Amino acid sequence: MRSRSVSDVVLSGVVDVPAPPARLRADWERDIALSFEPGDVEPLPLPRARARWPDYRHCVQAAADWTRSLGLHDVLASSDVALMACRGARYHHDGAQYGGAAFCNLFLSDDKGLDVHFPATGHRIPLVRGTALLFDTGQPHAVIQRHSDGFDAAHFAPDRECTQVFLTWELSIENIDIVRVLGIDFDIAPVTASQLEEEQVWWRGAPASVWPESGRWRGG
């Protein structure tokens, strides 16, 4: 296992994507209402959605064009894609499960007054249909109400229109273009990495997580 730095680069933009069909959006809302709690980020069935989504390829092409504009060439073509949804998102990092990847996200829902917030870097990005993001999985982040200071489950009650659906790609963190764009440094703690059996994010010399309401680091 290799050690690496966690990039504080967060890239964002807005691309032109059509709204998914109304019946498909209704299916997503029903699935979210049945199984999602405030703060949950979970997958939706992509193969089922693609069968009823004429503009799916347009969305993928828009994301591919955006990443190419960043100098990433055809990185999406060789990356796994999933369809995800959230009713807000508690502060978290994904480094323990996806430490070998960066995320590229394309949001498909209309503006519902929500932001993606990266507390350690200060980035706060409004979520509108077509918002595209590229960031390090080890960087803490959340989906919160636009004028709030942190995650509050009460802001995402079932009677509120506050869900977001997005496509996400896992991009290999060792891709030379990802390394360059995000400024990743490798082998910064080889002795520690050689003793680990699973991916971890370390802070102040120990495995670390974040407080789900604020995004502040804890541990170390």
Image (cartoon, grey):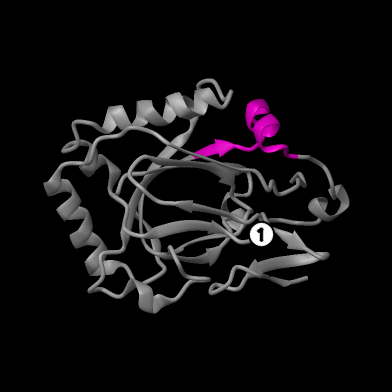
Residue pictured at 22% horizontal, 60% vertical: 31
Residue pictured at 71% horizontal, 49% vertical: 6
Q: Where is residue 94 in the image (x, y as percent from the top left)?
A: 57, 56
Q: Position of residue 23 (x, y in %)?
A: 11, 48
Q: Does the magenta stretch include residue 91?
A: no
Observer-nearest of 164 and 204: 164
Q: Mark 1 packing: few (<14 Cα in 10 Å), some, or many (20+)? A: few
Name the quadrant of the C terminus. Answer: bottom right
Observer-nearest of 217 and 220: 217
Q: Where is residue 175 in the image (x, y as percent from the top left)?
A: 64, 29
Q: Is residue 171 magenta?
A: yes
Q: Is residue 165 above or below residue 32?
A: above
Q: Position of residue 159 (x, y in %)?
A: 22, 74
Residue picked out by circle 1? 120
Q: What stretch is highlighted in magenta?
A: 170-184
Q: Quadrant of residue 60?
A: top left
Q: In this view, does 29 lie above or below 67?
A: below
Observer-nearest of 190 and 86: 86
Q: Quadrant of residue 203?
A: bottom right
Q: Which residue lies furthest to the front in this view?
A: 147
